[in-house]
Image (cartoon, rainbow, N blue to C red):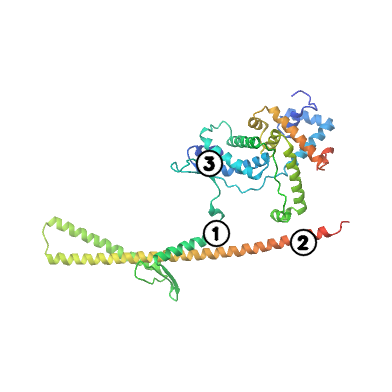
Amino acid sequence: MVATDEELVARSMAGDAESFNQLVLRWERPIYALAYRVIGRDEDARDVAQETFLRAFRALPGFKGQAKFSSWLYRIALNLCRDWIRKKKRTPIVDMPEDVDFIEMAADHGPVESIEDLVARNEMSRVVAEGMKRLPDEQRTAIVLKEYHGLTFQEIADLQGCPLSTVKTRLYQGLSVLRKHLESQGITSFASGRTS
Amino acid sequence: MSLMFTCDDKATLVAYLYDEIDAPDRKRVDEHLRQCAACAAEVRALSDVRSELTQWAAPDAELGFTIIQRAADHPPAGTVLRPPQWRHSVPVWAQAVAAMLVLAVSAAIANVQVKSGPDGFVVSTGWMAPAAVPATAPAAVATADQQWKPALIALEQQLRDEIRATRETGTVRAASRSSDTDDAAVRRVAQLLEASEARQNRELALRVTQLARDMDIQRRADLLRVEQAIGHTGVEMAKQRQTLNYVIRASTTPQQ
């Protein structure tokens, strides 16, 4: 039977580092993905993810369990992302790979996805990443937490330290900016309201 | 929420979009969308934006973070994150080669010789005088066990009886008789020691033989896997070449 986060946290607090490593294994990818989408750099996202777990491990004795362990990790990771953006005074830069080998990608994805589909998907990914880069940090973070991590409005409000209504406003404004960006990139179905 | 949904209530619109809305409010929004084309179009457009967002995937990075704890006397005390251990990245065949190397060095130190000849697998060590052991060693070991264990028990019992008898009578036996008994006991002990030593030697030889056999099986299995991997790579390259040819043909064909 798979141990829950709470059980692993309890064992970790009792000094079992291996249990904490199971938590790391379970959450390293979501935390890395969160950092990558917020700050947009692969290497820096790895650093943020690593630092998140290191800080969590050191702060574990102070974790009282008021929030979910995952929410606690998200909070640490978002604080690190915020520090990264503030200290380096950088706007997020999405480092999309330039020299994508579509033939290799097609081989990886098997016969289901054609090269044309892969090219289109990669182009769409680039356009979306560009649009996300244009958003203010708080809007981008809200959209990332909602769309890619499935958090509730209330969980996002708790993480961002703002009222529920502010989260909804950020989501609406962010999606609206993205809509305009996609239209400007020739994805015109949005203007007429038809699905693409 | 008020009884009527209005076009400027974007917070409720977002709640509707993400399906985090209670049933009465959802019903009101549905009613409004049936009457307001602009709001209906906006909801569809924002839904489309959401579906396009799924196209943005984070890189498939190799992470493998691990927390390790350093001993308190190892400065700096605390924790570090380390990369995945080296053995996870070393192929099985390389690990097998390393294991064989260690075995060979150990065998060289112990002067173990493994030979295959007409008599089967023969192993000898340098700790004792060279001795050939046939491959039927397990049966021989079992037989030897059956022989020396009862003899050792009998000897122990004899010694205990003699000591007990000496204590009980308090008499001194004739020097010649005592000397004869002692000589016999020493000979028996020497024989048992030799038997024990020979048994240990045979057991060692048997274990080395089994280890060598296991290593050989592992080597063959690894070679088979390597051959299969090479064959698989060849097939993949052929597929990719076909795909490339198709793309080139498609790109050079004039569009109609």
Letter of the chain that mark 2 sits on in the rendering: B
In the visual, does A67 lie left or right of B188?
right
Can residue A141 be seen here? The reply is: yes
Q: Position of residue A30 (x, y in %)?
A: 63, 42
Q: Residues within 10 Å of mark 2 (few under 14, many from 20)?
A: few
Quarter of the image for residue B126 reads bottom left
Residue that numbered label 3 is attached to: A20
Q: Are the two marked residues, 2 and 1, in contact with CB atoms closer than 8 angstroms?
A: no
Query: How far separated are the C-alphas under marks 2 and 1?
Result: 36 Å
The three-letter amino acid code for the residue at tag 3 is Phe
* Amino acid marked by disc 1: Val
Q: Nearer the viewer, residue A187 or B222?
A: A187
Which disc is residue B92 wearing? 1
Q: Is residue A158 left or right of residue B195?
A: right
Location of residue B95 with respect to A59 vertically, above or below:
below
Labels 3, 2: one chain: no
> Residue B250 versus residue B200: which sits nearer the camera?
B250
Label 3 marks a residue whose chain is A
